[in-house]
Image (cartoon, rainbow, N blue to C red):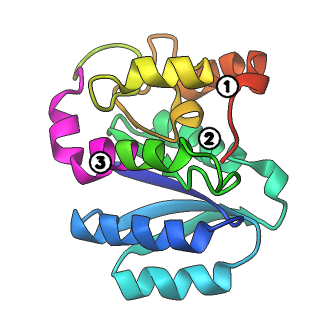
Amino acid sequence: MHIVWHIAAMGNWQEVVREQLALLHQVQLLNVDCTFVGTGLDWLLPECQRHGVRVGIVRSDPNLMHYETFAMLHIERLVQLSAEPMLYFHTKGVSEITDPGKMPWRRLMENALIRNWRASLTMMPWGSIGSRPIGSTATDRISAAISGWRGPRGCGSCLLSSPITSRGTSCVSRARLGSARSADAVSRA
């Protein structure tokens, strides 16, 4: 399984990163591709080592305005190369640490998709054409209600199956088009 983690170095990002690293270590997801915006790689890399999680920095930039773009581009590249399932998550809520809904939402998705990743994999529609994010039973509906989009950026985490469509376009390409149309409805980080 490919694991892609996007980190936005803003707000309480170090606290969120420690929480997510501890969870990754606990469930033995120890090889992660990471995209990073902002400054703080000098803090991040030793912290990952302390938690026993091998993080490969795919791309980083000090400009926070890139948001999750680098992660989405990396996912798009990966789905062209592999049919393996993919876990995507990010530091949801760090841009708005006072928002009362962001931390519970991040924790719901962490529980459904990281802590219980093995169970989530058993729910995957193997062999199907196309892709859909999955989570807990209600997360697709909740994600659609909150963000207007059922993709990785809207919910902050997702597990993708069968990422290549019958036309060879990735789900990320389709999702990016849908996301661009409703960009004002999509919350950042």
**Residue annotated with mark 1:** 176
- Visible residue check, residue 131: no
**Residue annotated with mark 2:** 72
The CA distance from mark 3 to mark 1 is 26 Å
Image height of 116 relative to 150, above or below: below
The numbered mark, 1 or 2, whose residue comes first in the sequence reads: 2
Q: Residue at x 32, y 65 (%)?
A: 23
Q: Residue at x 38, y 27 (%)?
A: 139
Q: What residue type is labelled 1?
A: Arg
Query: Residue 111: x, y in percent?
Result: 29, 48
Determine the main secondary structure of the stretch shown in magenta. Answer: helix
Query: Residue 72: x, y in percent?
Result: 62, 41
- Residue 82 magenta-highlighted: no
Image height of 90 relative to 13, above or below: above
**Rendered image: mark on residue 111:** 3
Q: What residue type is labelled 3?
A: Asn
The magenta region covers: 109-125
Q: Residue at x 58, y 20 (%)?
A: 149
Check disc 3 and report its element: helix, strand or loop: helix
